[in-house]
C-alpha cells in the first residue's frame, strides 16, 4: 500500500503528527515499537491541554504547588496561581494519543524500524513486523522521523543527527502513600542537589495513585539507581512498592536542521526539542509533531521539498527565545551546589515565581510586565555574582 506519509515512532510527537495528517485527509501509517514507556515526570501545562484537546480523564493528578529543594534542603514552595499543572502517566497517555490517531484514519502498525530504501520507483520504510517477525516495507512519498532521542532516522538521514547533547534520565514509578513526610500528592518537588544529580536535578512528581521519582545526568559513571534510591529515602518514600523502572536519554538542544532535503523531516526528541534546564518534553514534542505535519502537508501540496524546512522555522519562531533563556539558566546555575543554592534562593522572589509560571503555563515569555523582567535581571545578576547571600537552613 502506498502512503502520503509514514510516521516512525508513536510517542506524543509521532502520534500528533499522524493524527493531524489523517484528519486533513492524507493517507498515513504510524509505525510504533510496542511496549516501550519513556521515563517522564508526566507534567503537562494548561496550554497543551487546550491546544491538543486532552480530556480530563487523562489527568491522573492536578498539581497546585511546586517545591524547589536546595542542596542544604532549604525548600521554596511556589503556588500555581489561577490554574494547575496536569499530570499524566505515559503508559496510558501515549496509547491514548495513538488510538486517537487511528480513530482519525491513520493505519497503526506495530513493528521495529530497520531502514529506509530508495530506488527509481520511490521511497520505502522497512520495518520488522512484531506479529509475524517478517521484514516488511511501506512505500511512501514522505517520512516523519519521531523515533526519540538517539534517533536511528536522524542518524541515517540528517546531517549532525547523531550529535545531540543529552542527559540520561531514570525514574521509578512507585505506589503513592498519600501525604507523608516530605511527600504530598498535590505538589511536585524538584531537587537541585549535586548529591542526587551533579549537573541536572531530581524530581518527585505525583501521579495520583502512583508517583514518579527520578533524576537525570549527562555525566558518565553516575549510579542513577543509587541516586534515585537516595532521593526516595530523603522524601520518605523508600519503603513504597516499586511498580516499574525506566531509563532513556533526553536531548537538550534542537538540531540545526530537521529535514534531509528530499523526503524526510524530524519531530520531537529526534529533532532535540526538549527544554533545557527543565527537561520538559511532552508539550514541545507535540508541537514538534504538529509543525512536522504542517511541513509535510505543505510539501505534498506544493511539491517543493524546501517546504519541509517549515517545521523547524515554525517551531523555533515561537520557542527559540524561551529555549535560549532556559539554556542560559542551566549553564549559569547547574554548575555547582553553591550555584544551585543561589538558584533556589532566587526562587523566593515573587516576581520570579509569577513570571516563571506564567511562562510555563502559556509557553512564552510574558511581556505584560516589563519592569518585572528588569527587576529579575538585576536580582539574577546579584545572586550569580554573590552580592546576595542565600539564606541557610
Image (cartoon, grey):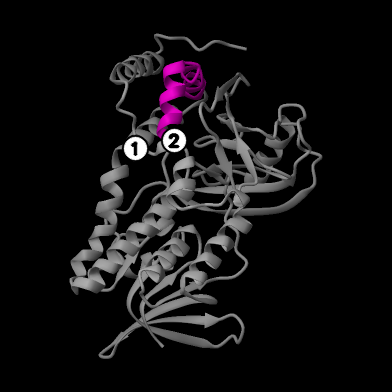
Residue 360 tag number = 2
Say above or below: 103 vs 131: above
Q: Position of residue 94 (x, y in %)?
A: 56, 59
Q: Quadrant of residue 209?
A: top right
Which span is picked out in magenta? 338-361
Give SS at disc 1.
helix
Q: Position of residue 42 (x, y in %)?
A: 57, 46
* 50 sits left or right of 193 in the view: left
Residue at the location (41% across, 12% down)? Answer: 386
Quadrant into which the C terminus falls:
top right
Observer-side mark, 2 or 1, equals 2
Q: Are the residues at dot 2 and dot 1 in contact (C-beta closer than 8 Å)?
A: no
Give the residue at mark 1. 322
**Can residue 281 be seen from the camera position used here?**
no
Q: Position of residue 254 (x, y in %)?
A: 34, 50
| Label 1: how many Cα within 10 Å (few below 14, some 14–19, many 20+) | some
Residue 57 tag number = none
Residue closer to the observer: 154 or 301: 301
Give SS at disc 2.
helix
Residue at the location (45% across, 36% down)? Answer: 361
* 256 drawn magenta: no
Amino acid at each position: 500500500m502506498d502512503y502520503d506519509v509514514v510516521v516512525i515512532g508513536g510517542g506524543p510527537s509521532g502520534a500528533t503528527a499522524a493524527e493531524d495528517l489523517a484528519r486533513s485527509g492524507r493517507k498515513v501509517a504510524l509505525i510504533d515499537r510496542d511496549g516501550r514507556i519513556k521515563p517522564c515526570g508526566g507534567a503537562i501545562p494548561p496550554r497543551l491541554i487546550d491546544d491538543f484537546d486532552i480530556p480530563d480523564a487523562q489527568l491522573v493528578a492536578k498539581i497546585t504547588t511546586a517545591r524547589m529543594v536546595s542542596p542544604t534542603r532549604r525548600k521554596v514552595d511556589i503556588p500555581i496561581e489561577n490554574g494547575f499543572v496536569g499530570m499524566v502517566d505515559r503508559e496510558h497517555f501515549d496509547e491514548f494519543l495513538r488510538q486517537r490517531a487511528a480513530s482519525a484514519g491513520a493505519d497503526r502498525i506495530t513493528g521495529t524500524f530497520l531502514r529506509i530504501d530508495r530506488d527509481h520507483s520511490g521511497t520505502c520504510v522497512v520495518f520488522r513486523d512484531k506479529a509475524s517477525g517478517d521484514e516488511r516495507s511501506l512505500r511512501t512519498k514522505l517520512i516523519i522521523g519521531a523515533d526519540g532521542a538517539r534517533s536511528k532516522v536522524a542518524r541515517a538521514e540528517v546531517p549532525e543527527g547523531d550529535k545531540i547533547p543529552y542527559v540520561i534520565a531514570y525514574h521509578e514509578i512507585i505506589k503513592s502513600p498519600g501525604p507523608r513526610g516530605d511527600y504530598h500528592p498535590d505538589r511536585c518537588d524538584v531537587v537541585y542537589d549535586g548529591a542526587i544529580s551533579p549537573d541536572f536535578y531530581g524530581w518527585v512528581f505525583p501521579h495520583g495513585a502512583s508517583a514518579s521519582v527520578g533524576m537525570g545526568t549527562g555525566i558518565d559513571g553516575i549510579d542513577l539507581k543509587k541516586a534515585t534510591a537516595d532521593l526516595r529515602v530523603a522524601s520518605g518514600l523508600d519503603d513504597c512498592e516499586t511498580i516499574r523502572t525506566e531509563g532513556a536519554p533526553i536531548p537538550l538542544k534542537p538540531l540545526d536542521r530537521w529535514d534531509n532535503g528530499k523526503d524526510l523531516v524530524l519531530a520531537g526528541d529526534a529533532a532535540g526539542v526538549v527544554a533545557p534546564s527543565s527537561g520538559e518534553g511532552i508539550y514541545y514534542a507535540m508541537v514538534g509533531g504538529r509543525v512536522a505535519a504542517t511541513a509535510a502537508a505543505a510539501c505534498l501540496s506544493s511539491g517543493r521539498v524546501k517546504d519541509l524546512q517549515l517545521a523547524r522555522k515554525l517551531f523555533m519562531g515561537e520557542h527559540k527565545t524561551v529555549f535560549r533563556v532556559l539554556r542560559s539558566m542551566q549553564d549559569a546555575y547547574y554548575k555547582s551546589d553553591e550555584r544551585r543554592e543561589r538558584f533556589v534562593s532566587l526562587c523566593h522572589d515573587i516576581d520570579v515565581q509569577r513570571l516563571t509560571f506564567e511562562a510555563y503555563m502559556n509557553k512564552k515569555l510574558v511581556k505584560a510586565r516589563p519592569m518585572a523582567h528588569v527587576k529579575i535581571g538585576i536580582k539574577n545578576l546579584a545572586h550569580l555574582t554573590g552580592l546576595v547571600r542565600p539564606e541557610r537552613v
